[in-house]
């Protein structure tokens, strides 16, 4: 068995890459990932990628922030240190709205930043995961997991038929920038 981990099909044109995805799926070859230098409309649907759940996470972080500060403010201003200011009641909801809104936005922003870094593995200081460095410049790359897959020659033939400029057999998981 070869040491090849991934077979990379490099395309010069996004339309040829989309045609390559169609041919690979038609031949039941599972695609590991696709790397492009720019966003391509409709590629998520073609690859079967589900919609992001980041909106749900944002809502949860907002609820956490709003509940946290409302609870803190209520405890401090009503139970711990109630003050009679101008005869107003200690628990006046309009007084709590600005700080509750601000903490909701704050928790959502920080929570979404951390969630995004966690979900995409883009922590600061981490080496970016790139199969081929040209995918960040001018090439469109289809990566296929070579372990336990269709014979490599058949995959190479399908990629060449689809219009791949180059087909590489990669023995490393990712290319490092160093």
Image: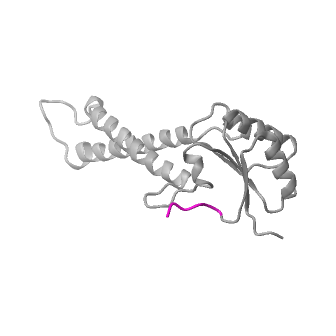
In the depicted view, which residue is nearer to us: 51 or 104?
51
- Relative to 151, does residue 29 appear above or below in the rendering? above
The answer to which quarter of the image holds residue 168 is: bottom right
Q: Position of residue 128 (x, y in %)?
A: 52, 56
Judge from the rendering whether residue 149 lies leftward or rightward of residue 130; answer left or right: right
The main secondary structure of the magenta stretch is loop
Residue at the image position 25 percent from the left and 47 percent from the top? 76
In the figure, 32 relative to 2: above or below? above
- Picture quarter containing residue 88? top left
The answer, for residue 67, to whether it is visible in the render is: no
Q: Position of residue 40 (x, y in %)?
A: 62, 34
Residue at far left of view: 86
Measured as percent of width and height from the top left, residue 43 is found at: 68, 36
Left or right of 40 on screen, residue 99: left
- Magenta residue check for 98: no
Does residue 58 appear left or right of residue 167 in this picture?
left
Q: Nearer the viewer, residue 114 or 157?
A: 157
Quadrant in the picture for the N terminus: bottom right
Q: Residue at coordinates 50% horizontally, 48% vertically from top-left? A: 116
Q: Of residues 123 and 165, which is closer to you in this image?
A: 165
Q: Nearer the viewer, residue 60 or 163?
A: 163
- Horizontally, residue 149 falls left or right of residue 140, namely right
Image spot of residue 11 (x, y percent): 69, 43
Q: Residue at x 78, y 59 (%)?
A: 146
Q: Is residue 148 above or below residue 9?
A: below
Magenta span of residues: 173-178
Residue 44 visible to the viewer? yes
Q: What residue lies at 52% left-to-right and 43% top-to-bottom?
A: 57
Count of marks, rendered view: 0
């Amino acid at each position: 068995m070869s040491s090849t981990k991934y077979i990379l099909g490099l395309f010069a044109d996004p339309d040829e890459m989309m045609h390559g995805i169609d041919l690979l799926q038609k031949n039941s070859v599972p695609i590991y990932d696709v790397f492009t230098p720019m966003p391509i409309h409709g590629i998520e649907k073609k690859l079967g990628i589900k919609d992001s759940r980041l909106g749900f996470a944002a809502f949860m972080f907002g609820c956490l922030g709003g509940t946290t500060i409302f609870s803190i403010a209520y405890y401090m201003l009503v139970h711990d240190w109630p003050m009679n200011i101008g005869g107003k009641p200690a628990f006046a909801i309009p007084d709590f709205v600005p700080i509750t809104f601000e903490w909701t936005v704050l928790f959502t922003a920080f929570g979404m930043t951390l969630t995004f870094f966690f979900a995409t593995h883009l922590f600061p200081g981490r080496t970016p995961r790139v199969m081929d460095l040209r995918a960040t410049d001018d090439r469109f790359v289809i990566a296929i997991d070579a372990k336990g897959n269709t014979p490599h020659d058949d995959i190479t033939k399908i990629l060449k038929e689809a219009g791949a400029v180059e087909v590489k057999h990669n023995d490393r998981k990712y290319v490092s920038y160093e």
